[in-house]
């Protein structure tokens, strides 16, 4: 797995696996879809650019998002392949914790983490006077503050969005500042508010990885009575996911059984007739999820000259690695 020139973004997230019964570790906790039901609460660390799950823990359902995140991240960092490094760590408000930020700073890791809107942060957001206009609906500002129990003062970046009737605004509404919603991140990075906002939006990919784990590989469907057995099945699914991701890195594209088509970004370096063939190839997998003679007849029906493109791909496979 080749490291990007600028390094990887490491995205942290947790999810909920609903359970039926009294399996070990299945407890009542945060479960927005099926409140009051038992669940497990996995924690994941994903290398965004590679779509690769660096580490995963299966935890009891009554575990908070950030519970154990420091030892978890210590293990994850030890798994980083030699010659790779992190350009940033990104996480949502469930990981807004002073001790976690202390750990990241002690390891000299850049981070951007969604802030939990405490009373203090709401007051500081409402008090911002200098706003930088990003577009007709968004503006950014920032402030520094040391929160109660924290070891130091930290930088907070704020994006303010105008409330519109035509689009649901994202963020929290403040009573003292009607007509806007606010999103706040804490960071030790020095880039502009706009650059940080755009970079954090790239974290949406981790939620897609979780959906793929659940719907394509049934990660939440393997549940046995002993916790260690359920955990082993969970880790086996993560291993399978990574094998598929690595396979995609060295191939031109793939199509999942849910109909999700993934294309290797290096296809931009190929001739147009090759790109057309790869896309049509994957589209035909929506009809046949195999490489049978029938599948190739489907490909030929929409791309009569596919053999030339297929030969080009084989001859230039190094370009896609």
Image (cartoon, grey):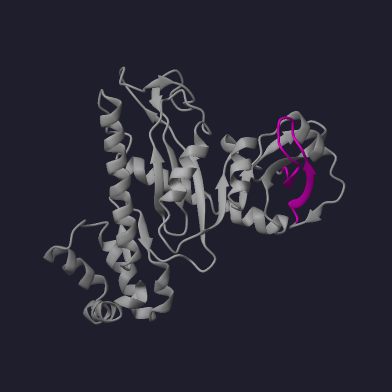
State the quadrant of the N terminus: bottom left
Q: Tell me the residue at 33%/42% (across/down).
A: 215
Residue 72: give x, y in percent of width and height. 46, 39
Horizontally, is 102 left or right of 270 in the view?
Answer: right
Q: How many marks?
A: 0
Q: Tell me the residue at 44%/47% (across/down).
A: 76
- The foreground one among 210 and 299 is 210
* Residue located farthest toward the right when viewing the structure as drawn: 129
State the quadrant of the C terminus: bottom left
Horizontally, is 46 left or right of 248 in the view?
Answer: right
Q: Is residue 97 visible?
A: no
Determine the main secondary structure of the stretch shown in magenta: strand
When the figure is inspected, residue 88 is found, relative to residue 124, above or below; the finding is below
| Quarter where residue 271 is shown | bottom left
Q: Tell me the residue at 30%/55% (across/down).
A: 244
Residue 98: give x, y in percent of width and height. 65, 36
| Quarter where residue 303 is shown | bottom left
Does the magenta-highlighted stretch encompass residue 112? no
Residue 247: give x, y in percent of width and height. 29, 61
Residue 14: give x, y in percent of width and height. 47, 37
Horizontally, is 70 left or right of 247 in the view?
Answer: right
Does the magenta-highlighted stretch encompass residue 146? yes
Which region of the structure is painted magenta?
136-163
- The foreground one among 196 and 56 is 56
* Residue located farthest toward the left when viewing the structure as drawn: 293
Horizontally, is 83 left or right of 163 in the view?
Answer: left
When the figure is inspected, residue 165 is found, relative to residue 109, above or below; the finding is above
- The foreground one among 273 and 214 is 214
Q: Is residue 179 visible?
A: yes
Q: Tell me the residue at 65%/53% (across/down).
A: 197
């Amino acid at each position: 797995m080749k490291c990007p020139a600028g390094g990887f973004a490491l995205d942290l997230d947790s999810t909920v696996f609903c359970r039926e019964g009294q399996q070990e570790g299945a407890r009542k906790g945060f479960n927005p879809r099926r409140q009051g039901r038992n669940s497990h609460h996995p924690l994941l660390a994903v290398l965004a650019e590679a779509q690769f799950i660096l580490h995963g823990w299966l935890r009891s359902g009554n575990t908070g998002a950030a519970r154990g995140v420091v030892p978890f991240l210590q293990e994850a960092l030890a798994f980083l392949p030699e010659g790779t490094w992190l350009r940033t760590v990104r996480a949502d408000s469930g990981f807004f914790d002073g001790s976690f930020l202390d750990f990241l700073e002690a390891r000299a890791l850049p981070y951007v983490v969604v802030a939990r809107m405490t009373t203090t942060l709401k007051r500081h957001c409402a008090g911002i006077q200098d706003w930088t206009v990003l577009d007709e609906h968004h503006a950014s500002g920032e402030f520094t503050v040391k929160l109660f129990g924290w070891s130091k003062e930290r930088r907070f970046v704020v994006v303010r969005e105008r409330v519109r009737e035509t689009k649901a605004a994202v963020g929290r509404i403040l009573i003292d500042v009607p007509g806007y919603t606010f999103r706040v991140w804490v960071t030790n990075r020095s880039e502009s508010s706009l650059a940080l906002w755009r970079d954090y939006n790239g974290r949406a990919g981790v939620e897609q990885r979780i959906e793929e784990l659940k719907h394509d590989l049934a990660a939440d469907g393997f549940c046995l009575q002993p916790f260690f057995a359920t955990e082993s099945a969970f880790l086996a699914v993560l291993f399978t996911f990574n094998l598929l991701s690595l396979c995609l890195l060295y191939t031109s594209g793939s199509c999942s059984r849910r109909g999700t088509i993934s294309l290797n970004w290096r296809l931009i370096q190929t001739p147009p007739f090759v790109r057309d063939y790869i896309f049509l190839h994957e589209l035909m997998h929506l009809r046949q999820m195999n490489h049978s003679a029938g599948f190739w007849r489907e490909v030929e029906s929409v791309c009569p000259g596919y053999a030339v493109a297929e030969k080009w791909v084989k001859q230039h496979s190094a370009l896609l690695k």
